[in-house]
Image (tube, grey):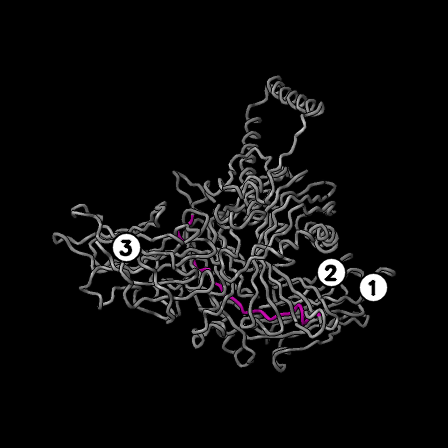
């Protein structure tokens, strides 16, 4: 968010980081945007009387000044080096600036959560825009917010018990085992006065769901003055000003004929929610760059382990419904990823004479699943050829890519860029938190991959000045035909990839042995296939635990692999029983399925474990709903998408790819003065999600060769000059994306060929200009360059395109121009057209 956006935030709706009341902050960066923001609740402005400081406050101030003066005197008396003073001062200044930045972000997010959405739009809050503004099929839910407001005190009391019983035990175990922090507990949980706010609701119709279920997406944001106190190893700390936002999906299934009409409810986040908070107490010492990231990473990991896909939480509403019918769903598919290479990454390791390199690696994640590539030393153009696979539960999920730079010094890894894939410069320790330097990031909507089947793309990294990553993505569907295994094995064995998906539904165990008399065990189950291992939740004080959990394994060869299962007591660590199951038996079963098998454990007691195993052969290709024969109905797919990756394709550094476009006819950009109707031959690709059509320029391709992209057709030779553009508006990032493909039939003056380049503006602001590189001595230049303009609202906006000559011998440097009106441009559509140029 730029400074202008910050200036538009209501001071009365933002709270200062110290937990003060609205309007009491001395930070005057948040200026009112009008009467509505000065009086958001419809009441008069409230002022709080502040009592003058008492004698205790004066005494504390006097003691603090005496301490500072005494410290300075002592340093001079004992002749202590000034370096001991400079270091802490620099650290405190950096910490203070970092905290101010994060406090301002939290305040802006809180204002967005509590304020009126109409005023938020006017204030141009960017990424904090409510989803009902961005997506036309998402509706406002003010009635639901009013209900939550009245229920909030009751929810507050229930949450404390829920956190103590459900969240605290796994968090305590994770801190003890991974970070050597024992005796963790929540001392106090107050959620604050501001309830969770639902910014948008979307309910999918029966065309996109099974008739026995209802699927609803909630765009939620929680920005509250909460007060959460914890203790770790007798050290007390706390969290205030918590901010959490994300898309929460509710799946209500199965539908039944008796009250309550719904058998149960699943709830989970499609992608990891954004999380931020302010540390207080002893934890305030760690609220600085690096250490604070460690704490946030721990909390984020626990959230992902509980309720981010593939992990789900569910509530059973009817005893007449089997819990497995509520909590078990079949994944949508598997995405196979090859991180091939990256180029032009930042140089994070400083070398001699100003030269330097990076040691990049890439982190890829889908939901709670994560994979990390090998480290390539001393290069800014690494080649990994790294393959991995991840299960996709829902098509709304995002592939996150982040790059890091490795440094072989503890706590130093640097960020190199993000794309939903992360690339980092490696430093030993916690990757991407304390050590490795950030190199960039980007993200890819997996619904687009499922639609195309295969994508081979270069994507620019975000949040960094430069860098791009080359990815090859393949969508793997499921086949229940065992005969398909032979082809799957041939395809996967060369790279050690999976040929099948094994789904294990762990139901329960019975008659587990008792380790100590009078004390029942706390059993949990460890399941493993090859190097992949999962753990179930631990059930306290029972010999007959009921788990009802689902685990997915990507199996290389079901004819030779084995499922290993072990039951362990959480308290003592003693094994309660184990077993092995050859997957060959599952493969040869009818429909490759073993339904509710009771298997014996190798114990002295008659211990048994009940589970269901189901196998599917992986088969490459687009999802069934996106196969070519059904493209006429592709526009009915309304799965929300949020790809934010930027593609970079110039004729110099990226091999041109063919255009893949639908035959559907979409809207044409309405011309203004100086622009005639676009000629016939326009290609408009209707795109329902944010990214449908993003790779329909030189990005998304099938696996076949083609002629170079966008060469001028012969039918246009001898005609007036024209420019070919692809225009798209990103609903998620609020970016107008323009691809300049080619210009044809430019005039020749004085027998000199021009050196043409293209300039682009968005009117009326004209705040940002983009231009292509100049093509020397060309009348039909090909650019294939992509540009982005930040635009919150297309209404009243016009794209101004100018073709100019870089040579100075012409009477006028302008060769032609066109104005493209954006008022009637439909959100989510991609339009590729020829536009006539006027001189």
Badge 1 is on which residue?
Answer: 514
505 vs 636, left or right, is right
Toward the viewer: 523 or 447? 447
**Residue drawn at x 59%, y 66% as measured from the top left:** 215
Toward the viewer: 343 or 630? 630
Residue 297 vertical position relative to residue 721 in the rendered view, above or below = above
439 vs 62, left or right, is left
The outermost residue toward the top is: 77
Is residue 339 found inside the magenta-colored segment of the image? yes
Q: Position of residue 806 (x, y in %)?
A: 22, 48
Whether residue 104 appears in this view of the structure is no
Label 1 to label 2, Cα distance in Å? 15 Å
Q: Position of residue 651 (x, y in %)?
A: 31, 58
Label 3 to label 1, Cα distance in Å? 85 Å
Which label is found at residue 827?
A: none
The outermost residue toward the right is: 518
Q: Label 1: how many residues lie within 10 Å, few (<14), some (14-19) or many (20+)?
A: some
Label 1 element class: loop
Toward the viewer: 39 or 72? 39
Badge 2 is on which residue?
Answer: 538
Residue 80 vertical position relative to residue 766 in the rendered view, above or below = above
Badge 3 is on which residue?
Answer: 673
Residue range in magenta is 323-345
Whether residue 234 appears in this view of the structure is yes
**Labels 2 and 3: the sequence-earlier one:** 2
587 vs 767, left or right, is right
């Amino acid at each position: 968010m730029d400074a202008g956006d910050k200036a538009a935030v209501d001071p009365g709706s933002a709270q200062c980081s110290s937990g003060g009341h609205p309007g009491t902050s001395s930070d005057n960066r948040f200026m009112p945007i009008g009467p509505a923001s000065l009086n958001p609740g419809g009441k008069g402005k409230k002022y709080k009387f502040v009592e003058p400081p008492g004698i205790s406050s004066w005494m504390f101030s006097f003691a603090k000044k005496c301490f500072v003066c005494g410290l300075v005197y002592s340093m001079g008396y004992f002749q202590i080096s000034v370096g001991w003073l400079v270091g802490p001062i620099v650290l405190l200044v950096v910490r203070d600036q970092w905290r101010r930045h994060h406090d301002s972000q939290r305040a802006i997010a809180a204002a967005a959560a509590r304020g009126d959405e109409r005023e938020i739009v006017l204030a141009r809050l960017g990424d904090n825009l409510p989803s009902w503004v961005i997506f036309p099929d998402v509706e406002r839910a003010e009635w639901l917010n009013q209900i939550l407001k009245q229920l909030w005190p009751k929810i507050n009391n229930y949450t404390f018990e829920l956190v103590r019983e459900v969240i605290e035990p796994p968090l305590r175990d994770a801190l003890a085992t991974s970070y050597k922090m024992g005796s963790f507990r929540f001392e106090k949980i107050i959620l604050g006065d501001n309830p969770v706010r639902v910014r948008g609701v979307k309910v999918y119709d029966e065309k996109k769901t099974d008739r026995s279920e209802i699927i609803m997406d909630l765009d939620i944001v929680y920005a509250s003055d909460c007060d959460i106190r914890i203790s770790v190893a007798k050290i007390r700390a706390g969290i205030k000003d918590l901010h959490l936002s994300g898309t929460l999906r509710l799946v209500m299934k199965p539908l039944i004929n008796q009250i309550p009409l719904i058998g149960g409810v699943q709830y989970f986040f499609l992608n990891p929610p954004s999380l931020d908070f302010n540390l207080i107490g002893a934890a305030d010492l760690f609220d600085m760059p690096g250490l604070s990231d460690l704490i946030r990473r721990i909390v984020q990991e626990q959230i992902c382990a509980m309720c981010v896909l593939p992990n789900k939480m569910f509530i059973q509403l009817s005893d007449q419904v089997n819990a497995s019918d509520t909590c078990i769903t079949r994944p949508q598919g598997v995405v196979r990823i090859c991180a091939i290479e990256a180029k032009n990454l930042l140089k994070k390791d400083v070398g001699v004479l100003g030269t330097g390199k990076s040691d990049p690696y890439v982190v890829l994640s889908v939901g709670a699943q994560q994979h990390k590539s090998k480290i390539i030393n001393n290069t800014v153009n690494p080649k990994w050829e790294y393959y991995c696979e991840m299960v996709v539960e829902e098509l709304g999920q995002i592939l996150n890519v982040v790059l890091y730079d490795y440094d072989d010094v503890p706590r130093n890894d640097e960020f190199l860029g993000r794309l939903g894939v992360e690339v980092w410069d490696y430093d030993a320790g916690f990757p991407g938190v304390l050590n490795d330097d950030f190199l960039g990031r980007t993200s890819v909507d997996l619904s687009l991959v499922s639609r195309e089947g295969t994508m081979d793309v270069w994507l620019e990294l975000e949040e960094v000045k430069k860098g791009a990553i080359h990815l090859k993505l393949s969508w793997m569907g499921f086949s229940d035909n065992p005969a398909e295994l032979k082809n799957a094995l041939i395809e996967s064995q060369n790279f050690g990839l999976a040929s099948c998906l094994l789904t294990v539904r762990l139901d329960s165990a019975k008659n587990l042995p008792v380790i100590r008399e009078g004390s029942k065990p706390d059993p949990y189950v460890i399941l493993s296939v090859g190097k992949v291992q999962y753990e179930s939740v631990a059930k306290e004080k029972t010999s007959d635990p009921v788990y009802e959990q689902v685990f997915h394994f990507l199996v290389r060869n079901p004819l030779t692999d084995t499922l290993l299962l072990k039951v362990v007591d959480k308290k003592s660590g003693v094994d309660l029983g184990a077993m092995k199951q050859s997957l060959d038996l599952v493969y040869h079963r009818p429909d490759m399925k073993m339904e509710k098998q009771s298997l014996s454990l190798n114990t002295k007691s008659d211990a048994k474990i009940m589970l269901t195993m189901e196998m599917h052969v992986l088969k490459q290709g687009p999802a069934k709903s996106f196969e070519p024969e059904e493209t006429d109905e592709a526009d009915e797919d309304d799965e929300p998408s949020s790809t934010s990756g930027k593609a970079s394709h110039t004729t110099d550094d990226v091999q041109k790819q063919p255009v893949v476009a639908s035959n559907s006819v979409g809207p044409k950009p309405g011309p203004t003065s100086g622009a005639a109707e676009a000629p016939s031959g326009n290609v408009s690709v209707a795109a329902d999600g944010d990214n449908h059509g993003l790779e329909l320029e030189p990005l998304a391709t099938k696996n076949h060769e083609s002629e170079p992209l966008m060469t001028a057709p012969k039918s246009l030779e001898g005609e007036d000059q024209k420019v070919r553009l692809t225009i798209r508006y990103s609903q998620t990032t609020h970016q107008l994306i323009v691809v300049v493909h080619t210009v044809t039939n430019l005039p020749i003056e004085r027998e000199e060929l021009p050196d043409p380049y293209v300039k682009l503006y968005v009117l009326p602001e004209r705040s940002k200009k983009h231009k292509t590189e100049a093509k020397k001595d060309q009348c039909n230049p090909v650019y294939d360059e992509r540009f982005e303009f930040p635009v919150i609202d297309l209404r009243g906006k016009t794209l101004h395109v100018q073709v100019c000559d870089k040579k100075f011998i012409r009477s006028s440097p302008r060769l032609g121009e066109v104005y493209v009106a954006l008022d009637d441009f439909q959100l989510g559509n991609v339009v590729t057209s020829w536009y006539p140029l006027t001189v």
